Amino acid sequence: MNARHGACLITLAALGSTAWAQAAEGHRHGTGLEEAPWQIAALPSVVVTATTSERSAADAPASVSVIEGESLRRRPVNDLADALKGSVGLGLDSLGLGRQGVSIRGMSSEHTLMLIDGQRINSSASAIAHSDFELGWVPAEAIERIEVVRGPMSSLYGSEALGGVVNTITRSATDRWRGSVSAYALVGDHGLDGNQYKGGFYLGGPLIPGRLGLNAWGEYRYRDALRDAGNKALSALDEQRATNGHLGLTWTPDDRQRIDLSASAGNEDQEGFRSSSTSPFYKAENEVQRRRYALTHLGEWDWGSSQVRLYRSTLERIARRSDGADATGPNRFTDTVLDGRLGFAAGPSHRFTLGAEARRETLEEPSVNRAGKKSLTHHALFVQDEIRLGQRWELVLGSRFDQHEEYGWETSPRAYLLFHPSAALTLKAGMGRGFKAPTLKQLSAEYESRAAMGGRGIIRGNPDLQPETNRSFELGAAYQQETWSVGATVFRNDVRNLIETVRQPTCFVPGRVCLNYENVAEVRLQGLELTAAAHLSARWRLEGNYTYLNARDRTDDERLADRSRHRANATLAWAVRDRLATRLRVEYTGSQYRSATLKDRPGHTLLHWYVDHELGRGLSLHAGVENLTDKRLANDDADLYGRADEGRRYFAGLTARF
């Protein structure tokens, strides 16, 4: 049996076990308790992404946001973009064709590194235009929490962590069996389809108490194509069918060691009807297969801790067009990583983390070179020192050294200072450097694409490209009391060597335009992030955030396009009774500059209302209305907005816990 067939069987086996579902939240902290859906939640106390070891959120040497998995299971979440909506400092880039990417502090979505349990996944956007295939790896049913680090983290994670990191932490087995099964429907109000339906489960528990644990999850989701309001024969959002499955084993041979083995598989089909200057009507199809395998050994020893991991992720995409035009591909991305780290204390004031990584990155695609396949090997070493400077001060120093086959070594230092004047007040200041390696296509001297500029342009690779870099600075303060908290952070990103396509003075094909990849652009992104939360009473809680962003292209001293200067989010939650709660969520997106010749995209506000009702015996009902005021955005005026919104839609879901 080959790997693909084996992964498909895993998916089928997982999806066939729908009588079981998700394990309880809180197992990583030893509580064994799950937050009831009608409770008003506080942020979790432990994060790992900022240092690779567990820390309280208040002591994390970075700007970190945390989204609880339990909160995601109370509202409709189709993919990771939906899960991250409303987070401070984050925006969703329009990638075209109704797809989205995750932007941190105004950086490109390609500068956001996606991790699952600290393990990187393939970046399909490096070779596929309009790609958002990074967003569908883990269903909401399987998420314990999502940690978002705003600011470069190449000192730990290397390339792509130029703007920040999104780390999805999945749920794992507890010391007793628990599970749940859930389903929801999301139905639009305009008769243009776009309706969503989803069902999933999670199961976790001991096969051999104290020695061997199992966790499994599965999901099926379907979205009707959203029809274009201007031409109902065309699709504003593609039809989507997706399945995900996972099996994981955890073996603890003794009190000091743990071994995790897991396999995940996902299949996704997308289909939409489009038009172009050459084809007034055609059907576009995408078939996407995701596979992920991981083996991890964790050790807790008298001298410290150790971790060794071997993991692989693959993403394969096949595209078709009914008009016979070139749909690009097929594309197959493979990342194989072997890494390890040691953590140990050196006296009372220092805790060191030492690590190494070897990564083999492969792209299989007809246009990348004559062989249709290109691979590169990355090697890296990193070191981190967490230094206690008395009772109130801490300094975290770190750097990573990446060696790339094409351009040599890249160094990514980072320094972060924390000061606690009191138990309630935390002051932070940090600086760091991040980088993003050019893609395999961009570096290939044999790469050539003739699909640019509607078929008029020819793009070629450039083996002399250098990495894109970011030098970042931030200063923050957070104050937390028992019933309320506030925080503020100012930041600046100076990004250099951004890679763009540059028009050449002559072209080797008459009547065409030749373009080369070159390091040309410099941008500065600076701004302010504010957060606040308060328990107004025993049953009322209000929380919100605001982001101001000033983004400028320093090569021509103009504003960067498609960035909102102002974003704000707020949620008001009311525990009506012990088993009944409701909340109102508000999203504001400010106007966006487009160009000197086009008027700005106007700002807009979206309102969402939800109700959670505990029915008893582990059964809970979730319902609500998204986009209460029925903002249609690009589906009514595609010239102004980049992505269509379905308008007002009604949500109903049911969860049964065991």
Image (cartoon, helix red, strand yellow):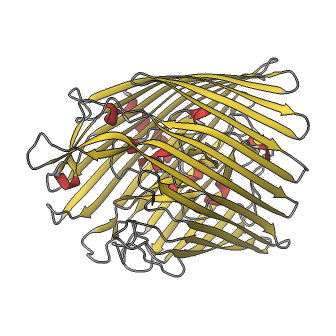
User: How far from the left and from the top, in percent, is residue 588?
Assistant: 57, 72
User: How far from the left and from the top, in percent, is residue 32?
Assistant: 78, 46
Front-lying residue, 136 or 593: 593
User: Based on the displayed image, in which of its 4 quarters is residue 95 positioned?
Assistant: bottom left
Q: Is residue 25 visible?
A: yes
User: Based on the displayed image, in which of its 4 quarters is residue 315 positioned?
Assistant: top left
- From this view, report whether residue 457 is shown above or below residue 253: below
Front-lying residue, 37 or 463: 463
User: How far from the left and from the top, in percent, is residue 35?
Assistant: 75, 57
Q: Quadrant of the N terminus?
A: top left
* Residue 585 falls left or right of residue 276: right
User: How far from the left and from the top, in percent, is residue 576?
Assistant: 77, 77
Q: Is residue 20 visible?
A: no
- From this view, report whether residue 37 is shown above or below residue 67: below
* Residue 40 falls left or right of residue 81: right
Residue found at x 91% / y 38%: 391
